[in-house]
């Protein structure tokens, strides 16, 4: 056991029992608080951040368990030496007991007398190393026989520095127990000086830190996994954003299409991104306004369910198909029928919704079809209404589905609004439509389509929206 005189200072006086009891109470209270946080961190293993939080709680509990055990030893004093009581204390199962099964068995002590070459170990050290307490303690020359080959130089260096240069020991090494299990041991100690000032012995406290190091590895691994997950999310967000920027119309705000004759529509659009603080992925919403070769105009909005690169790629495929079929003169209903077939034959199944409109400026006729999507809203003379909706199931939901068409004649000054879901978080389409229809007086006073879009953004662009949304406004000017 430790000598009262060490190489550099006299032994410290033990603290009062009352102060140690207070520390034990605080440590156990903190253990309870950490354990409560751990229980609240319920995770099925799919969320890297929750796995990391739980691993940190487990690590903290291991450390607090050890602190509690150390304080208890400080309060109760050192255990009897093996020479006085070679039988393990009550409740122990001898050297076969797992070091992690008893907190007190994780800390042992030893003293090596350099003059007599004798070694004295506590019963706990026998348990840590898995040795028979009836056998003599190992000498300093014999101790490395238990240590893994790659860790022996470290132990030799620590012992040599302690005995030759009087340096304190503070390091770790791994031992292999007789049953083949490996344990990680942390060793702290000092040389003890004799009356002549020379080193007479060396004492040390050895602590089994296997469970603690395992928890620390778990924390590192889950932290690294979380970091990789976040980097992957950032990469996916960047790729999806770049893909979205590449395929959506290269305009923001107002746009006047290059008509051959007089300008017939004043157009504006806007994409409202997810407004929650934790949003990292981009959805599959799109909008399109395209002048066709016959002088008509294609107006379309749609949404592919999901988020991320795969969804952005699918959205790009659908939008490219919409543009190609519209330029070929395909009617809106037939266009959605073909779009549904395309999505149904895609390698990765998906669901989507869309509205496709074809506007004829000479007659101000709007022909439109929808696939499981909110109907366009028509604002006229300060009031708004939903257009009569033709039948149409969501894209990808029913192979062979056929989509009907509706026709409406517009007037100069009318405002047509197309939008995707996601404008109102946590509510159905009815809530969004009601709020949009309430904007009719402001739309009636608006001079341009861009003014109408600004009104929508002011109303729906705040925090809390959990999905992307697109809005497209067309104002009939002639």
Image (spheres, rainbow, N blue to C red):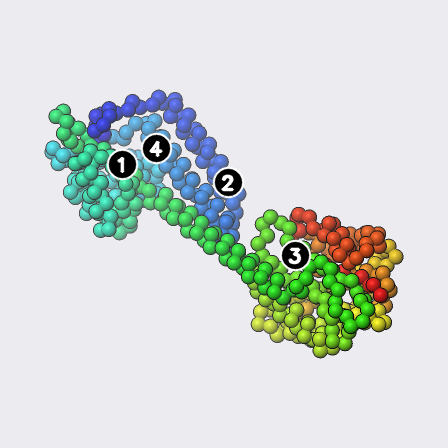
Kindly identify which numbered label has been placed on residue 37: 2
How far across and how far down the image is residue 189, in percent? 24, 34
Secondary structure category for the residue under label 2 = helix
Q: Nearer the viewer, mark 4 or mark 3?
A: 3
Tell which circle, 2 or 3, labels the residue nearer the N-terminal end: 2
Is 215 situated left or right of 387 in this image? Answer: left
Q: Nearer the viewer, mark 1 or mark 3?
A: 3
Q: For the point 60% across and 58% down, which residue is it?
A: 282
Q: Which residue is label 4 attached to?
A: 70
How much space separates mark 1 and mark 3, taking CA atoms?
59 Å
How far across and how far down the image is residue 136, in percent? 17, 39
Tell which circle, 4 or 3, labels the residue nearer the N-terminal end: 4
Quadrant of the rendered image containing residue 210: top left
Q: Nearer the viewer, mark 2 or mark 1?
A: 1
Tell which circle, 1 or 4, labels the residue nearer the N-terminal end: 4
Q: Which residue is label 1 attached to?
A: 188
Whether residues under marks 4 and 2 lie with C-beta atoms below 8 angstroms apart, the answer is no
Q: Nearer the viewer, mark 1 or mark 4?
A: 1
Whether residues under marks 4 and 3 lie with C-beta atoms below 8 angstroms apart, the answer is no
How much space separates mark 4 and mark 2, taking CA atoms?
24 Å
235 or 205: which is nearer to us?
235
Furthest residue in direction bottom, as rendered: 328
Whether residues under marks 1 and 4 lie with C-beta atoms below 8 angstroms apart, the answer is no
267 shown above or below 328? above
Kindly identify which numbered label has been placed on residue 341: none
Give the crowd class for mark 1: few <14, some 14-19, many >=20 residues within 10 Å: some
Q: For the point 15% across and 33% down, which residue is it?
A: 113
Secondary structure category for the residue under label 1 = strand
Whether residues under marks 2 and 3 lie with C-beta atoms below 8 angstroms apart, the answer is no
How much space separates mark 1 and mark 4, taking CA atoms?
14 Å
223 or 249: which is nearer to us?
249
């Amino acid at each position: 056991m430790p000598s009262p005189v060490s190489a550099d200072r006299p032994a410290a006086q033990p603290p009062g029992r009352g102060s140690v009891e207070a520390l034990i109470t605080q440590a156990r209270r903190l253990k309870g608080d950490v354990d409560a946080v751990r229980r609240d961190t319920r995770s099925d293993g799919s969320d890297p951040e929750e796995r990391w939080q739980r691993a940190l709680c487990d690590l903290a509990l291991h450390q607090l368990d050890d602190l509690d055990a150390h304080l208890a030893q400080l309060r109760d004093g050192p255990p009897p030496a093996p020479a006085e009581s070679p039988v393990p204390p009550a409740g122990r199962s001898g050297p076969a007991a797992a070091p992690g099964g008893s907190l007190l068995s994780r800390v042992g002590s030893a003293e090596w007398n350099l003059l007599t070459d004798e070694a004295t170990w506590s019963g706990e050290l026998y348990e840590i190393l898995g040795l028979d307490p009836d056998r003599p303690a190992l000498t300093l020359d014999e101790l490395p026989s238990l240590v893994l080959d790659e860790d022996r130089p470290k132990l030799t260096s620590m012992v040599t520095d302690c005995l030759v240069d009087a340096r304190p020991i503070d390091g770790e090494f791994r031992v292999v127990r007789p049953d083949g299990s490996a344990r990680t041991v942390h060793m702290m100690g000092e040389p003890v000086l004799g009356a002549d000032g020379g080193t007479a012995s060396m004492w040390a406290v050895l602590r089994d830190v296997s469970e603690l190091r395992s928890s620390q590895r778990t924390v590192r691994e889950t932290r690294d996994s979380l970091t990789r997950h976040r980097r992957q999310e950032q990469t996916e967000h960047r790729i999806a954003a770049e893909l979205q920027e590449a395929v959506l119309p290269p305009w923001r705000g107002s746009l006047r299409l290059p008509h051959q004759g007089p300008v017939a529509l004043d157009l504006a659009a806007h994409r409202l991104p997810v407004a929650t603080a934790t949003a990292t992925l981009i959805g599959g919403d799109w909008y399109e306004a395209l002048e066709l070769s016959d002088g008509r105009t294609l107006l379309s909005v749609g949404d592919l369910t999901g988020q991320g690169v795969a969804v952005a790629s699918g959205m790009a495929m659908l939008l490219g198909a919409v543009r190609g079929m519209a330029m070929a003169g395909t009617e809106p209903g037939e266009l959605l029928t073909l779009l549904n077939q395309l999505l149904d034959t895609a390698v990765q199944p998906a669901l989507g919704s869309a509205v496709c409109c074809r506007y004829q400026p000479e007659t101000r006729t709007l022909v439109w079809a929808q696939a499981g999507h909110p109907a366009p809203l028509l604002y006229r003379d300060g009031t708004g209404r939903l257009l009569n909706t033709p039948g149409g199931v969501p894209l990808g939901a029913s192979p062979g589905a056929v989509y009907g068409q509706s026709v409406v004649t517009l007037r100069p000054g009318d405002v047509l609004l197309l939008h995707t879901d996601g404008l109102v978080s946590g509510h159905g389409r009815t809530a969004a439509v009601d709020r949009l229809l309430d904007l009719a007086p402001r739309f009636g006073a608006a001079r341009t389509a861009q003014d109408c879009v600004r009104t929508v953004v002011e109303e729906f662009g705040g925090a809390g929206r959990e999905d992307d949304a697109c809005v497209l406004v067309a104002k009939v000017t002639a």
